[in-house]
Amino acid sequence: MRIVASAAADLGDLGQQQGNATNFDWKWYYSITAFVPAVVLLGVIVLIKANRHPAVLLILLPLLIVNLLWFAVAWLLHFSSSARMQYNPIMVSYAAAIAMLWLCAPKLGNRNRFVTFLLASAITAALCFVGIVSYLGWGFPGEAMAGLIVLAVMVVAVLLAFALAGWCCRNRYGPVRFMLYLALWTVLICLAVTLSVHSTVFILQQAPRPISRLLLVAGIYGSMLAACVYGINLPYMILALRSPFFRDRFYACLRLRSMSYGLASQTQTGENTEVASFSKEN
């Protein structure tokens, strides 16, 4: 790779318009670490018996849609290269973590709800950590730590929203009803988190701030965060509600009395016996 610095305008007698060329030996394998989350997802597909079915490949659809939409938004909003480097690891890692959650669902179902929540948190947090490190490496502790904090907030927001939406639908479940409650709790949790963070920052700065400004800033950032969390989760939820293969996992993890169970395993044999085993007891 050959890099040449140049001025945007002709400097005339003030100096050269182009600097001296710098050669950088770039190897193709320098970027291979960005594929580590994909390798982890592939490993989960292979290792978990319930995932050894062609229908599991449907999880690639929402993963592809989320990534394409993110890059389209970044292009339309004319994000700078530095902004893309800052946000790409967060968005890509979060999308992969949600996919990981659905792939590991056979190991999460038919458990105590609190245990399911803890396991889901550990699984998503682990892949988020892998994603951030694979993008930024160990040599960028500041950027990696900031990305991990944002991802932690997003993971907690989506998992709490799932739990609270399920609690609201415990006596009367419906797909539309659940998605509306999921949206409501996602917004409220994100607003509460951003308000807490900004309040703490204002207190630590020891500078007087009007309450109206605090609420405005927290509201803007909280709304943006909620839109990202819900928007990335939406394609996966559409898949879960439309595909019998993933709908069984969704039902088994929430375990709501008001759900009517129709096992996809009744029309699928062999590899799906593990899915049926954690769903039939509900």
Image (cartoon, rainbow, N blue to C red):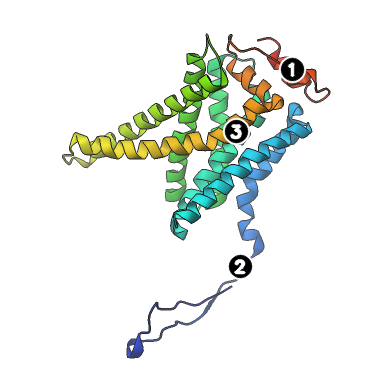
Residue marked by disc 2: 26
Q: Residues within 10 Å of mark 3 (few under 14, many from 20)?
A: many
Q: Say which of marks 2 and 1 sits in front.
A: 1
Question: Is 169 rendered above or below residue 64?
Answer: above
Residue marked by disc 1: 276
**Residue type at numbered disc 3:** Tyr
Q: Quadrant of residue 52?
A: top right
Q: Say which of marks 2 and 3 sits in front.
A: 3
Residue 230 seen anywhere in this rendered image of the structure: yes
Counting residues from the N terminus, which is met first, the one under dot 1 or under dot 3? Answer: 3
Q: Residue 143, percent across and down? A: 44, 50
Counting residues from the N terminus, which is met first, the one under dot 2 or under dot 1? Answer: 2
Q: Residues within 10 Å of mark 1 (few under 14, many from 20)?
A: many
Q: How far apart are the alpha carbons under marks 2 and 1?
A: 50 Å
Q: How far apart are the alpha carbons under marks 1 and 3?
A: 21 Å
Q: Say which of marks 1 and 3 sits in front.
A: 3
Residue marked by disc 3: 236
Q: With 212 as the anchor, is 191 left or right in this view? A: right
Callout 2 secondary element: loop
Q: Nearer the viewer, residue 13 or 165?
A: 165
Q: Residue 102, percent across and down? A: 63, 30
**Residue type at numbered disc 2:** Trp
Question: Is 223 rendered above or below residue 163?
Answer: below
Q: Residue 230, percent across and down? A: 49, 33
